[in-house]
Amino acid sequence: MKCYFATLYKRYSNATRFMLYIFMYTIICFASLPLSKAFATVFVSTITSNYIVIAIDSREFFTRHASVNVCKLAILPKNIVYFGDGIVNANLNDIKFDVRHIANDIVTADKSNNIEQIRDTFTQKIATIYERLFYLHETEAASVAPHGRVQHGFFAGLNSAGIPIIAADEITYDRGGTPKIVTKPMTFQMDGDVTRDLVVAHPEIVAEFVIYNSNRAQDLLKRLGYIVGNSSVENYAIRAKAIATAIRDWSGDDKIGGDIAVITIERGKKWNWFNRPAFCPELR
């Protein structure tokens, strides 16, 4: 499966956005380790200075050929949602972990109420786990981390001023010289009317929505109730759901599937389900 992490700026022209789209994506794909659960994830997240929207699929594989539907959004304390991709869990004889459980434990124990500090604590802990995983199972782990891409994790919520923020990490495996795990923090927080999309997707399908608006993309948006020119959080939730749905239905990738969960948060408010699959938890 080919997946891409891209950021696109709404304020740029279509031509400029196309060039950004071509040059800014980073390939990230993954499969499962033996005896572990893993999932091929497609998510679409939009962040502005006023809200965050996240749409994500729900298919998780517990063997190479068997899957179930699960909620890939971890609803954490302190008004934070975690989502991610890559090697997200393992259930081996000598190492067991699930990044969602680790994220929950760290947020629960945190005293800083700073989402970037939470991200940093999480990254430090999970990097240590990945170092052990690659030390004990380098061949298997490297085989499911193409190009050294191990994991992306995203903590989404509000900062102390109630402004939307996403604190993310990128973890890679460097096999050159002395093998090591490399971490890279990223923070997304918008000013003014700037809109940023974080997309893991087949780029040819995403382009139909963000670059040239194909007929089938327009039809899907219209069918879901999207209104051109409307900048409400609900309208962006429809857009995110449409892109994730299109990737699920048009890509032919059977590792992406299930219902599309969509959740939103507005400045100074709590998270709200726009589309909650039955297997996702109620919000407190």
Image (cartoon, helix red, strand yellow):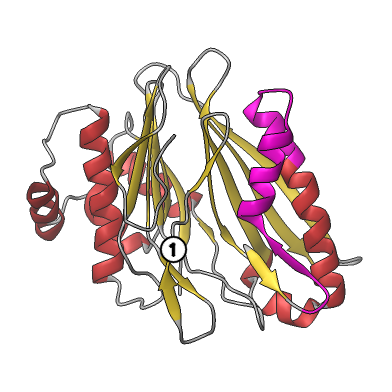
Quarter of the rendering occupied by the C terminus: top left
Residue visible at 47% across and 56% down in the picture: 72
Residue visible at 64% across and 63% down in the picture: 149
Q: Nearer the viewer, residue 80 or 249?
A: 80
User: Label 1 is placed on what type of residue?
Assistant: Val
Q: Nearer the viewer, residue 72 or 140?
A: 72
Residue visible at 72% across and 81% down in the picture: 140
Residue visible at 40% across and 53% down in the picture: 280
Rendered location of residue 250, percent (x, y)? 24, 70
Q: Indicate whether 172 appears above or below 241.
A: below
- Residue bounds of the magenta highlight: 93-121
Q: In the image, is 227 to the left or to the right of 246?
A: left
Magenta segment includes 176: no
Q: Residue furthest right?
A: 178
Rendered location of residue 30, percent (x, y)? 57, 71
Residue 211 visible in image: no
Q: In the image, is 123 to the left or to the right of 227?
A: right
Q: In the image, is 20 to the left or to the right of 259?
A: right
Residue matched to label 1: 70
What secondary structure is the stretch in magenta mostly built from? helix
Indicate the quadrant where residue 237 lies: top left
Magenta segment includes 94: yes
Q: Indicate whether 184 appears above or below 229.
A: below
Q: Nearer the viewer, residue 161 or 195?
A: 161
